[in-house]
């Protein structure tokens, strides 16, 4: 950098800029994240004159849905790909992001021209992957990291679909910083978003993630794009979950379920069974979570053990730890279960993550079942939110949840007392008003 040139310090987490180095970012409060960088030079570009239009004159044809050829991906996107949208896909290394996008690119060649830009592999490597996955079509491959070269190819080809793998490898020569830095990632994403909006090209961007699971780079990236998708799951396991974190064109609650096979990602259109083990052992309970419009039966498992230490351990996989601690406190105070000297471990089968409050009752019941060493009544599903007073509250769309339980052969539901809905034929409703009453149902079932 030239002598006397001004520099700024940029936070690597949120993109906050400061004229001097700071130990703690005043914006996101992260420690030791400031790096020195040259200030971004604003490039003036010609802008065509625009005028405000009445709502009735705005054409909405550009927002039509384009099927991607992968049903689970279309479900998460809200029904298909919207032309001119920018989609950011994040996930752990080896989870299958590039595999999914290559399969999508092979299907989209029938809908329009596809340009696949990679900064991590060569064109020959991409061809080998395409052959392994059976992705046909005449997609265009470009192994390049320079934004100016990519821009020239986009202007020449004018693709209908553009895939960037990955955004952390792209760089702009006008910015004096290394690829992957905050300023480079931000400028590259800004360019790609501008391409999507001005040309109508649907852009898919692959983003690396940090060790905490968040997309690497400043959080402003998630605000710049239209849709943020998170690819979740254990890379040593076959199942993958595609979750919508943000979607301007659809619901953010939908998930897609895939299984990694020999020929890439295989869709699982009916995933309820994969989250059930079918065991009747103590410490297991089943609930019905609603992910967008899809009801899914999920099994929650717990393990209770004595601890010789003064501070017992609480560990959770698939459930927020603070929510588990809250439910344990309610169990002790309102259901009179002694858990102060017990280690508590919770696991949601299949790598599923429970965020709905309707799953509280199942978590509490599996803990109580493990503590008293009594299995849940056979073919029983627990539905309900637990308040701090120990009351069991209702949840939305109970009819849809009950119908899914009946379809999979379950015979009884433990539900809140005031939940008003018509039960499907063959389903017995066990209504409880408090958590203590629900635990009593468990103890009565063990005596029987």
Image (tube, rainbow, N blue to C red):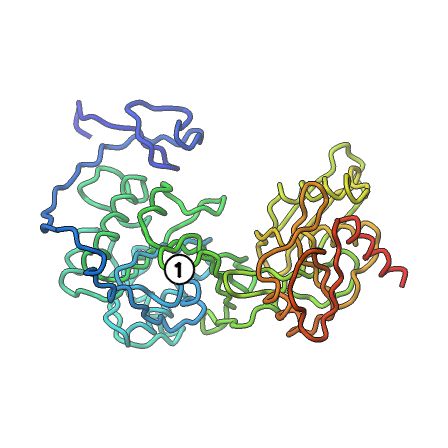
Give the image location of residue 186, x and y in percent. 29, 43
Q: Is residue 223 above or below residue 382?
A: above
- Residue at 25% from the left image edge and 53% from the top image edge: 192
Residue 74 rendering spot, x and y as whole percentages: 40, 67
Location of residue 162 in the rendering, given as x and y in whole percent from the top left corner: 27, 62
The answer to whether 284 is drawn above or below residue 427 in the figure is: above
Is 209 placed left or right of 46 in the picture? right
Asked if residue 169 is positioned above or below residue 422 in the image, the reply reads above
Which residue appears at 34% of the width and 42% of the height? 220
Q: Quadrant of residue 250?
A: bottom left
Q: Nearer the viewer, residue 288 or 308?
A: 288
- Closer to the camera in the image, 166 or 120: 166
Residue at image position (41%, 24%) is: 23
- Around disc 1, counting alpha carbons within 10 Å, would you say few (fewer than 14), some (14 to 19), or many (20 or more)? some
Q: Which SS class for mark 1? A: loop
Where does label 1 land, which residue? 250
Depth check, front residue: 355 or 373: 355
Location of the C terminus (image quadrant) = bottom right
Asked which quadrant contains residue 229, the reply is bottom left
């Amino acid at each position: 950098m030239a002598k006397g040139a001004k520099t700024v310090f940029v936070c690597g987490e949120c993109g906050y800029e400061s004229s001097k180095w700071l130990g703690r970012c005043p914006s996101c409060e992260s420690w030791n994240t400031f790096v020195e960088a040259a200030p971004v030079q604003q490039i003036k570009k010609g802008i065509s004159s625009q005028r405000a239009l009445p709502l009735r004159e705005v054409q909405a044809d550009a927002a039509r849905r384009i099927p991607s050829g992968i049903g689970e991906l279309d479900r998460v996107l809200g029904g298909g790909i919207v032309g001119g949208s920018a989609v950011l896909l994040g996930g752990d290394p080896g989870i299958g992001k590039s595999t999914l996008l290559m399969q999508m690119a092979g299907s989209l060649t029938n809908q329009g021209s596809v340009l696949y830009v990679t900064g991590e592999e060569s064109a020959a490597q991409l061809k080998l992957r395409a052959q392994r996955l059976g992705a046909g079509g005449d997609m265009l491959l470009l192994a390049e990291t320079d934004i100016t070269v990519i821009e020239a190819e986009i202007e020449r080809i004018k693709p209908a679909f553009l895939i960037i793998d990955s955004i952390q490898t792209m760089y702009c020569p006008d910015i004096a910083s290394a690829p992957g830095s905050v300023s480079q990632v931000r400028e590259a994403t800004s360019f790609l978003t501008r391409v999507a909006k001005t040309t109508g090209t649907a852009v898919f961007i692959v983003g690396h993630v940090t060790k905490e699971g968040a997309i690497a780079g400043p959080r402003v990236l998630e605000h710049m794009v239209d849709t943020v998708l998170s690819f979740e799951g254990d890379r040593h396991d076959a199942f993958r979950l595609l979750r919508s974190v943000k979607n301007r064109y659809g619901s953010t609650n939908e998930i897609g379920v895939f299984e990694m096979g020999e020929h890439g990602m295989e869709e699982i259109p009916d995933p309820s069974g994969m989250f059930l083990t079918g065991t009747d052992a103590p410490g297991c309970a089943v609930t019905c979570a609603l992910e967008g419009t899809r009801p899914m039966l999920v099994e929650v498992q717990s393990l209770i053990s004595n601890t010789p230490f003064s501070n017992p351990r609480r560990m959770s996989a698939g459930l927020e730890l603070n929510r588990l601690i809250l439910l344990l406190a309610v169990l002790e105070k309102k259901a009179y279960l002694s858990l102060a000297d017990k280690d508590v471990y919770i696991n949601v089968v299949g790598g599923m993550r429970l965020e709905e409050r309707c799953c509280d009752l199942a978590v509490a019941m599996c803990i109580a079942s493990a503590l008293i060493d009594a299995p849940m009544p056979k073919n029983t599903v627990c539905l309900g939110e637990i308040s701090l007073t120990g009351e069991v509250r209702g949840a939305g769309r109970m009819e849809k949840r009950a119908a899914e339980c009946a379809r999979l052969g379950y015979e009884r539901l433990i539900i809140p007392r005031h939940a008003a809905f018509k039960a499907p034929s063959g389903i017995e409703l066990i209504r409880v008003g408090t958590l203590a009453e629900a635990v009593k149902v468990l103890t009565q079932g063990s005596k029987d």
